[in-house]
């Protein structure tokens, strides 16, 4: 494609010092209907810097012409960025981003919120439906409670003519969809922003590039090094001296002469290695300037004509659909939510003892944090705060709302924001990076930052750690419950044993190897940990295990019934029918959400059924 808007955009990008080699990189229409994409015009090596976008040209709440008004009125998040972008659009050719916005508005993203009510209702069999409906409601509420008062307050800026032409609910919806589907986390100054050119890179579950940027900048002025940061680090030094400690390991990017001037890749590597900015001598040796840019860097070799892609983050399909308007077939990050009430229902059906169910559930909820710590920091990381996916509501799904995460154990649900740039010049999207960030975020997060009444089934049909623990609490023998109630150490031991057995029983050697392949094609860094020897279960343990497995199967059926998911056809048959139906856009992707959740339920039924048979 070579539309007028694209040509004008490219000329503008060049003028604004966005760097790409025209003989190596081009933006063009994708063959797979993913809109525009970035392609290699020749064979490119791993490590190649495909795109460099100076932060000065990103469109953020800090760079829009009404940054001060938004700040004064304390409007934040995607809503603020959307208003800023609408304002820039209303300025027409006066806006520094005019050619960029002209291209984006000419090719709006196809989102599920734009589907007819009837089409949306086809998604009722999956969790995406409620998310989409909530998005529609939130948008209207944001418009009425934030946008309208804001433009009315600043009637000198937003004249009647501008209001009618550029600040309608429909215009807000259209711009919010652009912001939602292309906002990228830049740093702790710009936060989420539109990053021209880099935002034409499409998502791929097996990407060949990464998005990297320095996140740690001055929150006041956005500089990598400035007097604000010097002042702050002086204050911190004073504080440290006062309490006599100096355990601050945060990289100091302030104007100190010893400021590291490493290149982005080096910083990234350091972070991957878990190193901190400790070796100042080594840093001094490196004379390279830090470019404060948002970069797309190739991870793999890319052939001529191949699309350059990145990973938007380990999101389940419902989040992908709500935020970006697409979903991924056989998405390894997909999840099914299990409500606590469903667990109560399943337990009640089997135990027929409401008092016991209530008492043990309450005990679990009160005490879970104590015994989760021992197991919690597991190998998969997986959850984080959905950074660039946030706006200002709090219903239980994407958009920064709830949808929070598992931070317990191997089954972290709901990916969370892995489009975020993490720490300094670190990968902004991608799974391995998400894990690092998750750990960081979790450390600083309040324990109660995730909804206690939501648990998850993962892509392979397994249940998450919290659900596994709760079911064990519900179904353990009376004397065992008395023991764990009395003695936290006994409880820890009990749950550790459960998790070790799960490792052994539910994940064979083969699975583990497959996982390693997924994460690291070269097989590097994936060491097989010898499994601990576990003795055979005693009779009591077998009895509890059997009851737990039966409860899981009951629970899966309850969850399926709640969403009208039937087993008249298999998930595989549904996928084949969906493909035959030749749907496109969000309608097709909505179908994938429904099919993906059914696949998870089916996997769970098959898996737990076979464990039961083996017992
Ligand atoms: C950040 S933009 C990428 C550039 C976009 N294709 C364009 O034309 O401007 C994200 C949007 O691209 C499309 N997209 C990206 N990756 C995709 C994928 N794997 N499958 C389907 N659509 C995708 C979706 O419409 C999404 O909202």
Image: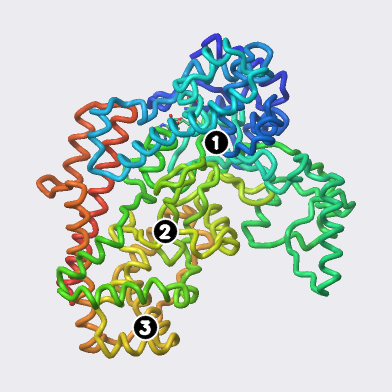
Name the residue at 36% across, 83% down: 494
Name the residue at 79% across, 73% down: 245
Q: Earlier in the sequence, mark 2 or mark 3?
A: 2
- Circle 2 Cα neighbour tier, 10 Å, few/some/many (<14 / 14–19 / ≥20): some
Cβ atoms under marks 1 and 3 closer than 8 Å? no
Q: Is residue 374 left or right of residue 70?
A: left
Cβ atoms under marks 2 and 3 closer than 8 Å? no
User: For mark 3, what is the residue?
Assistant: 494
Name the quarter showing ligand 1.
top left
Q: Is residue 366 left or right of residue 153?
A: left
Q: 383 or 395, which lies in front?
A: 395
Q: 306 or 571, which lies in front?
A: 571
Q: Which mark is residue 78?
A: 1
The C terminus is located in which quarter?
Answer: bottom left
Q: Give coordinates of residue 212: x percent, y percent.
A: 63, 43
Q: Is residue 588 visible?
A: yes
Q: Give coordinates of residue 603: x percent, y percent.
A: 23, 56
Report the Cα–Cα distance between label 1 and label 2.
23 Å
Quarter of the image holding residue 596? top left
Secondary structure of the residue carrying tag 1 is: helix
Secondary structure of the residue carrying tag 3 is: helix
Q: Which mark is residue 451?
A: 2
Q: Is residue 518 left or right of residue 541?
A: right
């Amino acid at each position: 494609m070579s539309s007028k808007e694209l040509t004008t955009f490219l000329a503008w990008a060049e003028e604004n010092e966005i760097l790409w080699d025209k003989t190596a990189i081009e933006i063009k229409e994708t063959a797979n209907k993913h809109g525009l994409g970035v392609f290699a015009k020749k064979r490119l090596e791993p490590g190649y810097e495909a795109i460099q976008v100076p932060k000065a040209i990103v469109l953020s709440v800090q760079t829009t012409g009404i940054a001060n008004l938004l700040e004064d009125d304390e409007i934040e998040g995607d809503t603020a960025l959307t208003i800023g972008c609408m304002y820039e659009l209303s300025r027409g050719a006066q806006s520094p981003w005019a050619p960029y916005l002209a291209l984006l508005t000419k090719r709006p993203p196809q989102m599920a919120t734009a589907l007819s009510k009837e089409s949306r209702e086809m998604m009722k069999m999956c969790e995406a439906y409620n998310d989409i409906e909530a998005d529609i409601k939130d948008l209207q509420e944001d418009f009425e409670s934030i946008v309208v008062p804001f433009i009315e307050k600043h009637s000198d800026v937003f004249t009647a003519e501008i209001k009618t032409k550029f600040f309608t609910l429909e215009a807000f919806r259209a711009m919010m969809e652009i912001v939602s589907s292309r906002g990228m986390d830049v740093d702790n100054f710009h936060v989420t922003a539109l990053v021209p050119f880099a935002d034409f890179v499409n998502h791929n579950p097996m990407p060949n590039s990464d998005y990297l940027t320095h996140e740690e900048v001055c929150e006041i002025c956005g500089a990598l090094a400035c007097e604000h940061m010097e002042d702050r680090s002086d204050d911190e030094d004073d504080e440290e001296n006062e309490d006599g400690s100096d355990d601050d390991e945060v990289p100091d990017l302030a104007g100190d002469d010893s400021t590291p001037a490493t290149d982005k890749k080096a910083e990234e590597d350091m972070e991957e290695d878990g190193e901190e900015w400790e070796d100042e001598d080594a840093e001094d040796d490196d004379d390279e300037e830090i470019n404060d840019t948002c970069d797309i860097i190739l991870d793999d070799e890319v052939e001529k004509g191949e699309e350059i892609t990145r990973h938007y983050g380990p999101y389940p399909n419902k989040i992908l659909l709500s935020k970006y308007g697409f979903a991924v077939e056989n998405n390894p990050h997909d999840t099914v939510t299990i409500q606590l009430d469903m667990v109560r229902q399943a337990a009640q059906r089997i135990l027929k003892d409401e008092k016991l169910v209530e008492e043990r559930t309450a005990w679990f909820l009160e005490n879970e944090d104590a015994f989760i710590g021992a197991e919690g920091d597991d190998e998969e990381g997986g959850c984080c705060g959905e950074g660039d996916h946030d706006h200002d509501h709090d219903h239980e799904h994407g958009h920064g709302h709830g949808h929070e995460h598992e931070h317990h154990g191997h089954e972290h649900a709901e990916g969370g924001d892995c489009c975020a740039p993490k720490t300094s010049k670190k990968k902004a999207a991608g799974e391995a990076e998400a894990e690092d960030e998750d750990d960081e975020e979790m450390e600083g997060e309040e324990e109660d930052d995730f909804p206690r009444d939501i648990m998850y089934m993962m892509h392979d049909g397994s249940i998450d750690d919290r659900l596994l623990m709760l079911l064990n609490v519900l179904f353990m023998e009376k004397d065992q419950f008395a023991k764990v109630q009395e003695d936290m150490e006994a409880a820890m031991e009990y749950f550790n044993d459960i998790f070790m057995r799960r490792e052994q029983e539910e994940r064979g050697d083969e699975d583990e190897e497959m996982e390693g392949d997924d994460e690291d094609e070269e097989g590097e860094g994936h060491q097989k940990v010898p499994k601990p020897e576990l003795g055979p279960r005693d009779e009591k343990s077998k009895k509890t295990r059997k009851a737990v497995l039966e409860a899981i199967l009951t629970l899966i059926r309850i969850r399926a019934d709640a969403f009208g998911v039937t087993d008249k056809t298999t998930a595989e048959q549904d996928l084949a029918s969906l493909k035959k139906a030749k749907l496109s856009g969000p309608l097709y992707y909505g179908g994938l959400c429904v099919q993906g959740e059914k696949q998870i339920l089916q996997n769970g039924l098959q898996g737990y059924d076979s464990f039961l048979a083996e017992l």
